[in-house]
Image (cartoon, grey):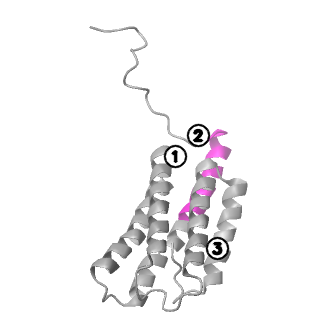
Amino acid sequence: MACFRQAMPIWFYYTLLALCCIFAFLKGGAPERIGTAILAIGSILTLATLWGRTNQYRSVATGVILIDVVCLLAFLVLALRAERYWPLWITALQFIGAAAHAVRLVDPAIIGRAYAFALGFWSYPMLLLIALGTYRHQQRLARKGVDPSWSTFSGRSDRAPRDGPTA
């Protein structure tokens, strides 16, 4: 969730994040609100972890790794449970960002700016995906009147079939 400070000022990202949060919390379903909350909490915790550090991307920040891995797991659970496609894409983007930490650990010679880019760039498409997901949620509500938030599975495998036991 690290911010891409070299190309965009930090206030720009957090302004987009705030707008996305407002939009998702007012117009989104439960998955959109949860996804926005994961992204916002991860971004704020990352900012707090890096606050005041000089040369933020010269080495791997273990706190940021932990935040990114927890966010990855949270997005993965959301992707598996939600009746939406956008959480799958966000999980993939979060994985790419988290993988940048592993690359940096393996090769510390990677330039700090490239490391910062690899971490922060993916946050912008994630915001776009949540906004688009919220918009599509509203479209489905307008068209069908309902938009299920969570996947329903076919049932537990240990239950007997409805017609009774079979031989």
* Comes first in the chain, label 2 or label 1: 1
Residue 65 image offset from top left, x and y in percent:
44, 71
From mark 2 to mark 1, how far is it between C-alphas? 9 Å
Residue 7 image offset from top left, x and y in percent:
52, 88
Residue kind at label 2, given as amino acid type: Pro
Q: Secondary structure at mark 1?
A: loop
* Comes first in the chain, label 1 or label 3: 3
Looking at the rendering, which quadrant does residue 41 occupy? Answer: bottom right
Q: Secondary structure at mark 2?
A: loop
Does the magenta-highlighted stretch encompass residue 35?
no
The residue identified by callout 2 is 148
The residues colored magenta run: 128-148
Residue 82, which numbered label? 1
Q: Secondary structure at mark 3?
A: helix
Residue kind at label 1, given as amino acid type: Ala
Q: Judge from the rendering whether residue 137 lies leftward or rightward of residue 108; answer left or right.
A: right
Residue 16, which numbered label? 3
